[in-house]
Amino acid sequence: MNKLSLSKIVGLAVGCGALVLGAVSASSKDSHGNWGRAFHAHAGTTFILSPATYPGGPRTHTIDGVVRFSGLGDCTIHAMATLVETATPGHYLITDGAFVITTPDGASTLTASIEGTGDVNPENPYMLDIQYDVTFTGGTGSLAGAHGYAKIHDGFAYFTTCDLVQPGGDSICEGIVPAGANTGKACWLLDGVLDY
């Protein structure tokens, strides 16, 4: 039987500790207590906000763009959600949302449901600060059965047309913006846990 020197014991302990820390950093627990792969993503999107069917009614918006998703690469995103006015001026609920992220090779998709809020930026009425809660609900290809949770944060949207934030018309937009139509651009960060 060989005796281990103190330096070998310390070396083994440090090596085992590094393996444990590596395993912990590769997977983590989400707010629901589930284990998965921690990830980060950032995106740039454009959107079209449809007219409300009645004054103050909900408005559907369609979102398309690109998202760089750690572990998946440079992906595309397509989403739809509903923007609902609240009793608080400048505060909106974002409901019934769903998005599909497609991997760069087009072979796999990741689906999710989304809901959140949007608040008109107090310094610029043409900007909306946004945040969403995201629940991953499945996918196709290598992402079939994917599940997890995430949060879209530090997001903002910029309206390139302005009747939503300036109801009744705006002299800058008069004659340019079709009645009830809005378009815009947005960027946001996404952090969460995904298992697939």
Image: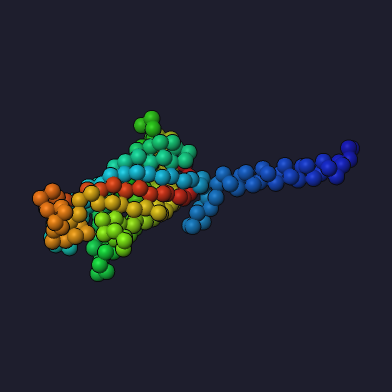
Residue projecting furthest to the bottom? 87
Residue under the image location 40 percent in, 36 percent down: 74
Q: In this orientation, which residue lies closer to the viewer: 116 or 124?
A: 124
| Location of residue 45 in the rendering, given as x and y in whole percent from the top left corner | 31, 44
| Location of residue 173 in the rendering, given as x and y in whole percent from the top left corner | 15, 52
Relative placement, left or right, of 86 versus 189 is: left
Q: In this orientation, which residue lies closer to the viewer: 109 or 150?
A: 150
| Location of residue 114 in the rendering, given as x and y in whole percent from the top left corner | 34, 53
| Location of residue 168 in the rendering, given as x and y in whole percent from the top left corner | 13, 61
Relative placement, left or right, of 34 versus 50 is: right
Residue under the image location 43 percent in, 41 percent down: 69
Tell me the quarter of the picture where residue 100 sits: top left
Residue projecting furthest to the top? 105
Residue projecting furthest to the front? 172
- If the image is split into quadrants, where does the N terminus sit? top right
Q: In this orientation, which residue lies closer to the viewer: 37 or 89?
A: 89
Relative placement, left or right, of 140 versus 89 is: right
Residue projecting furthest to the left? 175
Residue under the image location 53 percent in, 50 percent down: 35
Q: How is the image coloured?
A: rainbow
Tell me if residue 135 can be seen: no
Relative placement, left or right, of 178 versus 77 is: left
Tell me if residue 45 can be seen: yes
